Image: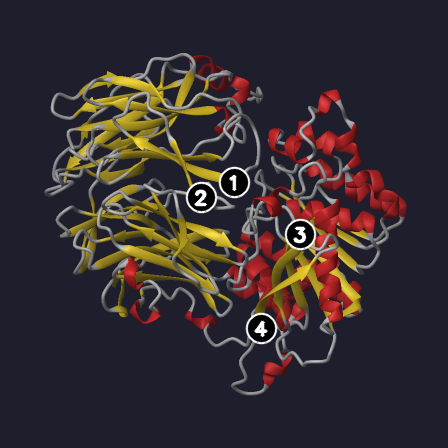
Amino acid sequence: MKKLSLTFLFFFVLTTFGYPQSSSNVENEPRTLTFLDMREMKSTGSYAPSPDGNWMLYTLRVPNWESAEDQTDIHLVSLTEGLSSHKQMTFTEEKSERSPRWATDGSYFVFISNRDGDSNQLFQMRVDGGEARKITKAKDGVSNFDFSKDGKWIVYRSGKDEDVQLYALPAENPGDGEPIQLTSGTTSVSDWEIAPSGDRIYFTRPDHPDTDNITRMEKGFTVDVKNYETPLESLWYIDLSTKEEHRITNDSGYTVAGMVVSDDGKWVGFTGTSSDRYKRNITEQRINADLFLYDVDNMTIERLTENEEVAESGPSFSPDGKWIAFVSSDDMSGYNMKSRKVYVREVDKKGGAFRKLGTKYNDHLGIGFWSEDGNTIYFNAGIKVTSQLMTLDVNTGDVKQITNEKARMTVSQDEDTGVLMVNYSDPMTPSTMYSISSLDKINDRSTWIQITDANPELNNLALGKQYEINYASTDGKEVGGVVFLPVGYEEGKRYPLVVSIHGGPAGADYLSFNENSGQVYAGEGYVMFCPNYRGSTNYGENHRTDIVGNYFPQAFDDIMAGVDYLIAEGIVDGDKMGAMGWSAGGHWSNWILTHTDRFKAISSGAGTMNWISMYAQSDVQRNRRYYLGDTPMYEDFEPFWEQSPLKYIKNAKTPTMVHVVEGDPRVPSPQSVELHMALKKLGVDTELFMYPGKSHGIPDTRNRLVKAVSEMAWMDYYVRGIGEKFSWQQVLKTLEKETE
């Protein structure tokens, strides 16, 4: 049956929706991108440079249609020779290898795999090839591992339920003997990190077993008690010479939620989240957390921040051990959406004030990596429809833009080896990894060495032109976005338009490959417009926060002004337009539905209809309250209702397809059900696609394909007047044909 399902999907996409630009029947004429191509695109990850900085291990993820899961193998490439040196190291078709790590001397590497069964184990492999050697036989599998900095030990985490502990193997001839159990507490180890000296391991664990919860589950009581009181977690360390465990934190006011050890091993920074069970949910625990600093020599803890409803990242230590820094809002007095700044002080100045850096820069700052001397922080920032490498001077607080690529790029540095990598994508280039020898040469593209080419089959496709536009909105302010022109675009000819609205809303669309499936639509003869409306990032603080208290109207005007700009340019046929979006993009799709009839079709994905009902249904409250004017909802419902698309649903006239995951925690499915029901009762053409799962995005790649192709069919039918609307009768007929 699985094989039938796969055959159906492939046949359905190719026959019903076709390879775009059927004119590619001409021999050797390049074809255009399809949704099936997108679902089959491979991706790379888990980059691991060798200790000498000459080689790179990485994983290649390959989608598996029949299992709806991904499969990964490990690859090797020279950082000086690039693609010509590429070598695949593992070859498992139905199993996966992940998380490669080099031995400290570079003689071999270790990875996690389920190749010998259902559980994950550690395997050792030499760089010159040969069969991988299994070095663990953990009954409950291995979840993660690392080498100690001194190269003596391989430490891994293994166990089940309440008994997950740390174990060690000697790095010399691993697997020859029995593993050593390091931790042995009554509760499981959560996060852990080996100290740079290699003589101790820091870790977190719950303060006591959750016996009531364990017992109730064993007895079959599976009720889900919301905001259930769970044990707090504390920070510990184990001395590897004595195997003794030592507790560091013992505070009922917070639970430890993450840690980082300084390069010199003298300091441990960690995050403490409020112990209040109602403040420990997934979306608000960060704004109810503070930062702490543990002095290893003096065994003292300093509280670095103490505030309400303000999120901080980090902390981060400079390589020279001089500075400690973190990222937080420009205004740390309470909840807000001001730009994030970097706060820094000398790490040993206990009780000292932090300096705020980057005050003249009108957008978010971050901490990517430090210069070796600790004087510069490098970070990646969105600049309109691109992302660039930036520097922050620790001494002056000045921010400078280093790169100027018409692309989406992320520069990173491996902490152990200093190897520099660039993840790069532009309108013609899918995500590709490069290595660079130094930051001084980053603007000389001839010095970049390409080390991955995950999808070479896409290199010769016929693509539409993709470019940036900037235009004046209704209030005179400049708004930007990305436009895709149809493949074979003819100047002076008007084309059907699909407006694709990004989520967030604090996000942005970029000049990157196939943003929002734009090239697939371009291949079918559409113009796609991806607006970076008010509320988007990359255009400064005011642009991002202009929607606060006035959530929909100004951004709606921004979107429509962009549409009118493209019509005025002679590119778009104003009588053939559709709109779609997911999450916040779905919110705006619903607002468009209830505030204009200029579009012929809409696809609403995981969008809100009623802010009042969604407030309690969703896992997000504080963020939305702020966006809608910052008045507590139960004190005044009016701002929430005034900005709810449902209030204006009588205006809806546009045929609307609705998509949502049944167990979506962020924009729960009842919002989509409300929309679908209203449209049915109002006599507006509508379909509701409810996907199984408990995530905000569609988890099954096969269902993501169904969503994509049905969405285009909806646009074709109502915008262009061609084809047939998606129907399951058609699906069943296709299956019958394949069965015969």
Number of other residues with Cα within 10 Å of mark 3, as a class: few under 14, some 14 to 19, many 20 or more: many
Residue type pointed to by label 3: Gly
**Residue 701 image point, x, y percent:** 54, 53
Residue type pointed to by label 2: Leu
Where disc 2 sits, the SS reads: loop
Q: Nearer the viewer, mark 3 or mark 1?
A: 1
Q: Nearer the viewer, residue 3 or 239?
A: 239
The residue depicted at 36 percent of the width and 15 percent of the height is 207
Q: Nearer the viewer, mark 4 or mark 1?
A: 1
**Residue 550 image point, x, y percent:** 72, 39
Q: Nearer the viewer, residue 95 or 266?
A: 266
Residue 95 horizontal side relative to residue 85, left or right: right
The circle on residue 365 is: 2
Q: Nearer the viewer, mark 2 or mark 3?
A: 2
Where disc 3 sits, the SS reads: strand
Determine which residue is flagged by label 4. 465
**Residue 74 image point, x, y percent:** 30, 56
Determine which residue is flagged by label 3. 581
